[in-house]
Image (cartoon, rainbow, N blue to C red):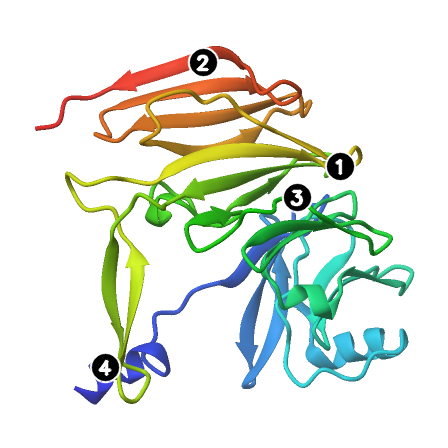
Amino acid sequence: MEDAMVKNRTTLAIENLKQLQFIYGTGDYVYVKKIDGKDVWVKGNLKTPETPFLTLEQLNDKIKASGYAALKTMPAIQFSKSPDWIFTVDGNRIAFNPASGQVKTVIPKNIAAKEAVEAGDAGYVAYVDNYNLFVLSATGAAKQVTTDGSKDIVYAQSVHRDEFGINKGTFWSNHGKQLAFYRMDQSMVTDYPVIDWTKYPAVNENIKYPMAGGKSHHVTLGIYDAVNNSAIWLKTGEPAEQYLTNIAWAPDDRSIYIAVLNRAQNHMKLNQYDVATGEFVKLCLKKKTINM
């Protein structure tokens, strides 16, 4: 019983490739591996065997030269998005250039602690504070995008009960200057009681949970222009009880693609929308199935 319930996450855990990713602009992959009991980034590709790439000692030598204190544990590092290495030090999300040794702050500590934090490639950072969406510019100026956020009106968060592959609520454009974000109105959804057993005595916490045959939440998608400080809403149409899934920007950032699924989940339409006007552009494909 101990092996099944306790050791399945430690000594008997299934081995996997932790934080597997490619190094930006190369065919080399990296992941974290235990070597002599320590976390070490190893590197490999299709032609060469894996070799140690980065130890904690080597990383500390690099960042200490930039004025940061030594790290005690190996951080999660993003190698795949840019030539810079992106990771967190002292609560700040930083971009470290391994060639020059220069460091710049991507997300400051006071913002990193907020909800739904996501940085775009142009230096803007989206986050949620007191239920509303804000965008921080590279100069440190924060713009409030929404004003009516609440427990019933949810912005920039995962919607549709995290189904259909949805796990976040903000989507930066390729150039990083426009932000697509969810708005979910769940005021019409009945409360569902959930007991929090971690507190003593246990506490009831109500959540919004659409029950079969009952009202479901209404979701729309906004587009915020960080340069012009303006926002529009995509005209995704009726019925309001539909699922807006698989949000994707066009390569030229002039359009957004949404897989729109009906509540019965038997008819999907992949639609294209103009991000300048919010207008429907065209139906790209559709698929209909019969529920058995």
Q: Is residue 117 above or below residue 174?
A: below
| Pointer 2 residue | 284
**Horizontal and vertical percent position of residue 275:** 62, 23
Q: Which badge, 1 or 2, comes first in the chain's sequence? A: 1
Q: Secondary structure at mark 4?
A: helix
Count residues near mark 1 (Cα–Cα under 10 Å), then give few for <14, some for 14-19, many for 20+. Answer: few
Q: Which badge, 3 or 2, comes first in the chain's sequence? A: 3
- Frontmost of labels 3 and 2 is 3
| Pointer 1 residue | 229
| Pointer 4 residue | 5
- Frontmost of labels 2 and 4 is 2
Q: Which badge, 3 or 1, comes first in the chain's sequence? A: 3
- Frontmost of labels 1 and 2 is 1
Check whether the beta carbons of the residues at disc 2 and disc 4 lie within 8 A of each other. Answer: no
How far apart are the two marked residues, 1 and 2, measured between alpha carbons?
30 Å
How far apart are the two marked residues, 1 and 4, measured between alpha carbons?
52 Å
Tell me which amino acid carries mark 2: Cys
**Horizontal and vertical percent position of residue 128:** 59, 55
| Pointer 3 residue | 145
Q: Is residue 61 left or right of residue 41?
A: right
Q: Secondary structure at mark 3?
A: loop
Check whether the beta carbons of the residues at disc 1 and disc 4 lie within 8 A of each other. Answer: no
How far apart are the two marked residues, 3 and 1, measured between alpha carbons?
8 Å
How far apart are the two marked residues, 3 and 2, measured between alpha carbons?
30 Å
Tell me which amino acid carries mark 1: Asn
Q: Which badge, 2 or 4, comes first in the chain's sequence? A: 4
Q: Residue at the far top: name it.
A: 282
Tell me which amino acid carries mark 4: Met
